[in-house]
Structure formats: C-alpha cells, structure tokens
Image (cartoon, coloured by chain):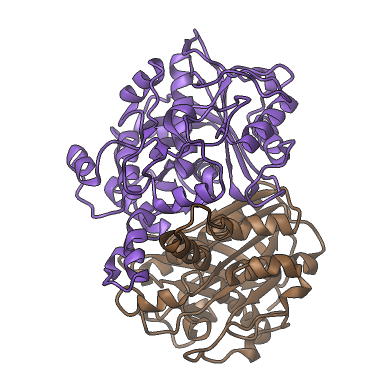
Chain colours: A purple, B brown
Amino acid sequence: MNIYITGYGLISSIGKNIDESLSSLKNYSSGIEESNLKTTKGFKVGAIKATNDELKKEFNIKTDCSRTALLGIIASKQAFYGHNISKNIRTGLISGTSVGGMDTSEFEYKKYLESEKHDINIYQQHSSGISSEQIAFELGISDFINTISTACSSAANAIIMGARMIENGFLDRVIVGGTDSLTKFTTSGFKSLMIFDEEFCKPFDKSRKGLNLGEGAGYIVLESEQSISSTKKEPLALLSGWSNASDSFHQTASSPEGFGAQLSMLEALNKAKLKPENIDYINAHGTATPNNDLSESYAIKKIFKSTPPFSSTKSYTGHTLAASGGIEAVLSTLSIQHGYIYPNLNFKNPIEETELTPNLKFIKKNKINHVLSNSFGFGGNNSTLIISSI
Amino acid sequence: MYYIHAISSITHQNTFRIDNIIKELSPIKENSNLISPDYKEFIPGAALRRLSPVLRIGLTAAIDCKNKIGKKFDAISVGTALGCLRDTEKFLKTFHTSTSDFISPTSFIQSTHNTIAGQISLGLKNHAYNMTHTQNNLSFEMALIDAIMCINEGKINVLVGSADEKTPFLELLQPKIISKKYPLSTGGSFFSISKTKNKIGIIDVKTIFNSKNTELEIKDFLKKHKYETKDIDVILHSDSNIEIPKSCHFINFLKYSGLYYSASSFALHFAHDYLISKNKNSALIVNDICIDKVGLILIKSNEA
C-alpha cells in the first residue's frame, strides 16, 4: 500500500514557512544566534524571533495555548492548507512533543516553589496531550488525536504511527509531525548533561563539542490511495519506509557502534524494499554531540558501503528536539520535490575514526529518488524514515 | 482477537502476582498507599535508588510479564498521561533553586515520558519497536491500538501497558483542575498480548474525541462486533453517566484504582479477572475520565 505525502508545513528559526526556510538553506544562513531571551540567555539557540502574541497576530490564532501548541498550530495549518474536512475521510492528528506546555508551566511552578501566588489554571496547558488536542481543534480534526513522546524521535515516531494507522485501515488521512518550544527546562537539562557547544554547533566535525538547542514545528499530511482518489490532492512524495528500534545501551548515550541506528536504518530499507545504494541523500540526526555523531557515523558506514551525500540541517535550525523529525521530514520531502541536497554548516575536519565528510554545498540535482532521515532520542529510541519520489 | 497471556499490575490494591485480583479489591480509601512489591527482586539496588515509582512499576511489571511468558517481546508500547512527574518536578526544583553552574542531570534524564519504555528496553535488553503514547485519559487506549497494529503487522508477543504517578503537587490542583471525587493514586498495569489463543481476548479498542452521546457511541461500537449492550456482562466505567440494562453489572473502576489518568489499564486487569472468576463472557471498559473523550475496550472470554 502506498502512503502519499500531500502537504507540508514548518516553522523554525530559519523561517516561518517553506519559502523562507528554503531561502535560508540556499543562502547558508543559519537561524542560530546568541540568545537574550529569559529562558536561554547566554546560549546560542535557534529561536523563532517573535513573541507568542506576535505569532498569534501574524497567523490569526485565537487559542489560548502554550508556545509549543502555538508553533504546532502554525506548522500544521500550513500542512493542511487546501485540505478539507470531510465525513468520508477519517482524518487524524498525531503529534510528537517532549515539553508540551512546559514553556508556561515552568514559570508558574517557580512561583509555587517560592511560595508566591501561582495561577493553577496555567497547568491546564501543561500536558503533552492537551497541546495536540489544541492543534487538532484549530484544524477541525476530531476523528483521532494522539501524542507521541519519545524525546528527540517523537515527530518521526508520530509519522510512523500515522503511516501504520493508514496501513492498518484505521485512518484515511493523518497530519503527522511534532512541535517543541524552547524552555528553561530543556536548556537547563542539556546544560546539566554538558553537551552544549558554546559556539555554533559543528555536526560531524572532529572538534564538535555539542548541540545548540532550537525550537519549531514540522508536519506532513499522509493519505491513502483511496483518500487521494477522493481529495484529488497531488502527491508530493511517498513515505516508503520506516522503522523504530531500541539501542538498549544507555538511557541517554548511544552505543559506540550505533546498533539501534543500524537496526532502524536496515528495517526502514527493508520496509521500502530498497537497497542502501538506492538512497540519494541522508538527512542525518547529526546533533553535533561527540557521542551521537560518532555513533551515527559508524552506523551509516556499516549500512552503506559507499556513503551517499549526507548532512545535518540541525546546523541551521539547532536541535528542535521532538519537532526535529517533523521539520526534517518536510525538508526531505522538499529534497525529493526539487532535487535539493542541503549543506552541513560549520564543518572543517572529519571525525578521525570514521573519516566521513558531510555534504557542504547547497546542491540541486536533476532527480532525487530516495531520502533517508534519522531521528534518535533518549532511551535509545532510534527511528528512520524513507521518503521517495512518486 | 488479541489474547492476554500475562498481566502484571502494581497499584494501591493488592494486585501484584495475585492469581485473580477480584477477591483482593475493595474501594480505595483516602491516604491509601501504593502496594509495592519487593523491587530488589527485579531491579539491582544501585539502579533502584534512582528510579521514581512510575519507573519502578513499569520496569518491574514488564519483567514480571516477561517471566510469565518466558519469551522476548517483539514490541513494547507504553501509555502515560503525565509521564515521569516526580523527576520532572525534581528537575524543575533543581534548576529553579540551584545557584551552581553544575547541576545533576539525573532527574532531567529520567523526566522524559519515554523513560518508562526506555528503562524496560534497557532492563530486558530488548532491541524491538519501543513506543510511548501520551493522550491524557486515553493514553493506555493509544498504547493498546499501537500494540494491536503491531500484532496485525506480524509481531508475535507485544508488551502493552500504562503507568502514572501522583505527587503532592498534583493534589494541590484539586479540585480546581483535577476532580476531587476520588483520591489521586499511583499505578500501572502491563499485559503481554498475542494472537495465540488464551482464556481472555481483546476484541477491539476505540477512542472517541468530542463525544456528544456516549451511549450512542457504545451502541455503534458494540454493533460493529455484533453485540448489544444487553449482551455485555459487565461494564467497567469511570463514573460514567450512561443508562445500561439491568442485566449488566456496572462497576466504577475509579473507586478501586483511585484517580490516575491512565487507569483504564487497571480496568482491563479488573475486567479480565472478573470474567474468569465469575465465569462470564464479555466485558466493556468505558473510560471517560476526561469529559468528551471516551475510550472503549471490548473483551471476551474464550471459554465461558
């Protein structure tokens, strides 16, 4: 059964829509900057340069919600633009998030800790499930709503869940992806793990020190064959393969040989009935932490005898956590549509053990048939998507 | 049908490693506590000290299920409504109050919702599909839908369950945003399910958002499987305001589990043991802990 991609939308520090994002990618223009926001002051982050009120005004959104839900609404509305709710097409929303409404609740909780008056109603926005319900409400979707929370692979897993819901005959069409906003919670968390780079992150570089955080949301619309015959939507690409596997090595670190990553890439290739040499571009997880990039490089080398062009677009957006797999699925779909291979910024020297050099230039090819996109999360949660031309 | 081959629950009731929990159950009292097994039997001491209740429950129940079936799981699907709340609050407190540049990452690492499923994969050295669903009161139903799809896709033994924990802070949110009708509680129930026949099977699970008429939704759901409400022996509900035939036993499961948003997994354990102990045929779980959002799970006995 074919799973068609018939819509996409994203927002991140490199753009509030597809055109702005592509223009940043073409111009080697990263969204990562030194932050002066109260949550991330002093760090280099990929923040969306607009307050919640500014975003609500610009995108005409009335819902009272967290920034996480707000970014999700903006990106999913772009993805669903031109689609209509219809009784005959069972439509769902499956969204990934790791922080949910933490961006608002963390400050109320501080007041509580300091024995100040805190507004209990704020916590109604907190649960991850609520953020998805708010997004679904804005889209007019009520047939099915689910939230996946597997840390940094959440959006990729939401996409996988959606594709399987269609394959199993439970849904005809589903908006899938993820959203996360910058919070003091995650900033403090990654700082405590000491995996921040104080400079711009350098994915796959020998001297990489760690990641830069980012925020954003990215969604794609998946439809069954039967659904498009009724919606008459022009498919942009196919979601041809997917897999999720466990590294089962450590709660936060990847195994040195990237066992879980190898498993997920192999199983996704099997699902898509493709051989490694069929892959034209890998949109790597590439967080720029010493551990991830080495482990992912080993896994890529093990699966691909000759490594296809690969890059980490996190050098543009920062690591948008639960949203990253959604944003990167949108970029991978654009890659199929236009033949783009994206640059990996800030790279100078390859990692000694693996000697892989990512793609450094913005390339437009005549044809790209298959893009493989990796997303790995805490808990050894490894996911791979393969997006293919029609 | 998706048959239940092992169950493991750790709750405020005496449910762990009990052959049939029905005779153990009594309405939950205010200030009751989680009845914890001797976790040391399942988790090494050093690791155990770091784990919050919800992580201990998940890991122990998963190991217990695995020991019962004696086979590895081909997929792991977990639901949690609020995730690892204790570690989340602990880390909030740490970074809000610490003056040091260096703070311990442990509670941050253990705060993500998928720490439960992740710890299970680590504890069981399991490399299979590993998923975490969080959809308020429907978190367990979501995990169950995923597990059913895994079996449809050819996976043999699937671990599915849910867990949630209460914290003192959650109690502060009562009654304003959390009902005070039932005491808040901590609990988790895990199941090993497969296609291989056994006493009790899950026929179907459904989630409904924006439900206008729960009775009608129930009717439609049952009709799809050639049942009428009067055919159902027991309905386990969450204080649901629905009219039911007199022939049907009507039990409010929240009276026994206490309130946690993924308590419908406890209801499934309850329903499973009810059918066996009373030699009955069919049970329906109606979970509308959150208004307008309904989860339905239909199970039947293969023997009665």
x 45%, y 39%: residue: A213
* Position of residue A234 in the picture relative to residue A261 (left or right): left
Give the camera-side residue of B267 and A98.
Answer: A98
* Position of residue B213 in the picture relative to residue B299 (left or right): left
Residue B132 x/y as whole percent: 56, 55
Residue B189 x/y as whole percent: 61, 71
Image height of A373 relative to A365, above or below: below
Q: Quadrant of residue B239?
A: bottom left
User: In the image as oriented, which residue stretches furthest toward the front?
Assistant: B100
Image height of A305 relative to B117, above or below: above
Image height of A214 relative to B50, above or below: above
Image height of A167 relative to A312, above or below: below
Residue B49 x/y as whole percent: 67, 70
Q: Quadrant of residue A47?
A: top left
Residue B48 x/y as whole percent: 69, 69
Give the camera-side residue of A301 and B28.
Answer: A301
x 56%, y 71%: residue: B265
Q: Is residue B201 visible?
A: no
| Quadrant, the N terminus of chain A | top right
